[in-house]
Amino acid sequence: MRQLTHDPRTIALLVIVPVLLITLLRYVFDGSPGTFDSIGASLLGIFPLITMFLVTSIATLRERASGTLERLLALPLGKGDLIAGYALAFGAVAVVQSALATAVSIWLLGLDVIGSPWLLLLVALLDALLGTALGLFVSAFAASEFQAVQFMPAVIFPQLLLCGLFTPREAMHPALEAISNVLPMSYAVDGMNQVLHHPDLTGDFVRDIAVVAGSALLVLCLGAITLRRRTP
């Protein structure tokens, strides 16, 4: 957290950029507010996931390249403890990020949500934590910050295309629909849509957030297993 406070560009990327993107989207569809209502909630969950993935993967790799991870792991500290510490630190930032983006979307940009804004915030927060977990995981396989960025097309873009944002998943080719059914971003978008269209808590919403939360936990565990002391 102290490192983040000394890096204003990272703070801006994590906290301000998602708000700017959702604001830009609102005015792109200025003449068609219904379009913003239909996709704004989904993107409210996707933007934090992408930004947290990018920043977390680069920050963790930088710690390894500078030797900080090796020094930390020389202490009586398990890999799981270290990953949990990173997750808690970036998770705290994710809370601020998600809360700010949700508040701006609903109360300043007029995003029309039938369900509770708190449920919308919950999904946005879980998406940000999922992005953090994915970033910690893929950083173990990158040898440089450039390679960490290259993982985005491989890890994020397929989920973005198959999550149901551009077309309903059931309208896709059966093979692509089957793949989308195992991608966590699909359930993040479904959860946002549940809040968008249903005033009450539904069973599908509970399932969606359970899948997103479970995916984040699973990826964090994989990140602890694959964590290396140094970059080769």
Image (cartoon, grey):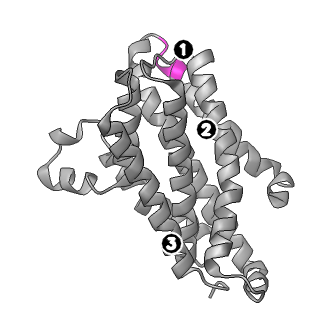
* Residue 221: image tag: 3
Residue beneath disc 2: 98
User: Would residue 19 appear left or right of 177 to someone viewing this image?
Assistant: right
Please report the residue visible at 56 percent of the width from the left and 76 percent of the height from the top: 224
Considering every residue shown, the one lying at the far top of the view is 31
Which amino acid lies under the numbered mark 1 shown in the image of this protein?
A: Gly
* Residue 188: image tag: none
Is any part of residue 7 visible from this angle? Answer: yes
Q: Magenta includes 216?
A: no
Residue beneath disc 1: 110
| Camera-side mark, 2 or 3 | 3
Q: Secondary structure at mark 2?
A: helix
| Camera-side mark, 1 or 3 | 3
Residue 214, horizontal then vertical, whole percent: 43, 58
Which image quarter: residue 34?
top left
Say whether disc 2 or disc 1 marks the residue closer to the N-terminus: 2
Count of marks overlaid on the render = 3
User: Would residue 62 appear left or right of 107 to someone viewing this image?
Assistant: right
Q: Which residues are magenta?
A: 26-30
Please report the residue visible at 14 percent of the width from the left and 48 percent of the height from the top: 173
User: Would residue 90 appear left or right of 216 to someone viewing this image?
Assistant: right
Considering every residue shown, the one lying at the far left of the view is 174
Which amino acid lies under the numbered mark 2 shown in the image of this protein?
A: Ser
Residue 180, horizontal then vertical, whole percent: 27, 52
* Above-or-below relation of 188 to 30: below
Q: Secondary structure at mark 3?
A: helix
